[in-house]
């Protein structure tokens, strides 16, 4: 599972105090720490990690509250699916930002030289917003 999501090191079957110690060590030595847990003993580690993932919707309420992400069943492959969805969403967001700034810069330049009127600028602004919304609604998987 670690290889599929691009994780460098994986630790498992640790006691609660060992989990917290490993996370503290890993935060010093690496860019980011992801912790996946499903029980009451996992809440401190979930809160300490950069990204905490609670497994199972029926898990301990404290763990669910401490986690950044909650997977409602015990299927760990949902984490891989979530990462793919997040990457697709990030791609769409960047498309929207680049398109919106490009159109607004173009209209600003055209307005500065007297080619675009205020109504054309308003229409371009509303049009860019609508196109960004429609782009965001498409399937990113």
Image (cartoon, grey):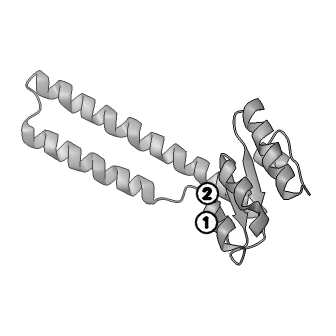
Question: Camera-side residue: 113 or 83?
Answer: 83
Q: Which mark is residue 68?
A: 2
Callout count: 2
Tell me which residue sits at (42%, 53%) in the image. 135
Q: Which mark is residue 7?
A: none
Question: Camera-side residue: 126 or 36?
Answer: 36
Q: For residue 23, which quarter of the picture?
A: top right
Q: Identify the secondary structure beneath mark 1.
A: helix
List x then y, in percent, for residue 63. Answer: 69, 66
Mark 1 and mark 2: Cα distance apart in space = 8 Å
Comparing marks 1 and 2, which lies closer to the viewer? 1
List the residue tagged with mark 1.
65
For the residues bearing labels 1 and 2, Cβ distance under 8 angstroms? no
List x then y, in percent, for residue 28. Answer: 74, 32
Tell me which residue sits at (78%, 68%) in the image. 75
Side (left or right) of 4 relative to 113: right
Tell me which residue sits at (22%, 50%) in the image. 126
Question: Camera-side residue: 51 or 93?
Answer: 51
Tell me which residue sits at (43%, 55%) in the image. 136
Q: For residue 38, which quarter of the picture?
A: bottom right
* Camera sees residue 60: yes
Side (left or right) of 121 relative to 14: left
């Amino acid at each position: 599972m670690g290889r599929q999501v691009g994780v460098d090191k994986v630790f498992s079957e640790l006691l609660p105090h060992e989990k917290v110690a490993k996370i503290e060590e890993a935060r010093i030595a690496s860019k980011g720490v992801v912790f996946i847990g499903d029980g009451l003993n996992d809440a401190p580690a979930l809160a300490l990690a950069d990204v905490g993932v609670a497994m199972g919707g029926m898990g301990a309420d404290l763990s669910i509250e401490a986690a950044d992400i909650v997977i409602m069943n015990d299927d760990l492959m949902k984490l891989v699916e979530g990462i793919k969805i997040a990457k697709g969403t990030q791609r769409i967001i960047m498309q929207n930002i680049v398109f919106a700034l490009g159109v607004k810069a173009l209209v600003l330049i055209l307005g500065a030289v007297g080619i675009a009127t205020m109504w054309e600028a308003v229409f371009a602004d509303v049009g860019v917003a609508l196109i960004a919304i429609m782009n965001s609604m498409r399937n990113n998987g």
